[in-house]
Amino acid sequence: MTNKNQDLSSKERLQAEIISLSERAKLDSWSDFIRELKVPGDIYPAMATLRPALMPKGRALTAEECQVLYDIIATLMETNAALKSHTEQTAILVKDWVKLFNGIQTVAHKIEDFANFRRVGEDDNAEERAA
């Protein structure tokens, strides 16, 4: 029963990692930003609907409007970094999940070997099982 205990602890570790990542996440959904954006009224429709075609045509900006746009750009850059981190963490979780499945598959093959009166570890039908 050692394998069952090892698998259970692996499952528990994976679950704990998912909970930990969720608690540390900087974003709560795909449409969130790292922090609240202060958006000038003329670009709000484009930002609210995520439709770049609604962006206004270029015009001269005041220093205050320019600073707001710089803040928006910085927030977008930070949000992009958070999304990248989220994706990387998800990939690691999937890799760990695959390892669990591979462990379960190994045990299943041993059970199959036993059921077919093969000594555990014999690999007579490894290709057949893979098909």
Image (spheres, helix red, strand yellow):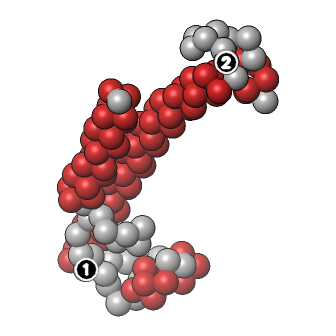
Please identify the quadrant where the N terminus is shown: top left
Q: Residue at x 75, y 17 (%)?
A: 125
Q: Residue at x 25, y 55 (%)?
A: 19
Q: Based on the displayed image, in which of its 4 quarters is residue 100 positioned?
A: top left
Q: Residue at x 65, y 27 (%)?
A: 115
Tell me, for residue 62, which label it has, or none: none
Front residue (pair 99, 52): 99
The residue labelled by disc 1 is: 38
Question: Circle 2 sits in a helix, a strand or a loop, which is it?
Answer: loop
Q: Position of residue 113 (x, y in %)?
A: 64, 21
The residue labelled by disc 2 is: 117
Front residue (pair 71, 47): 47
Question: Circle 1 sits in a helix, a strand or a loop, which is it?
Answer: loop
Residue type at mark 1? Lys
Residue type at mark 2? Phe
Q: Position of residue 84 (x, y in %)?
A: 39, 48
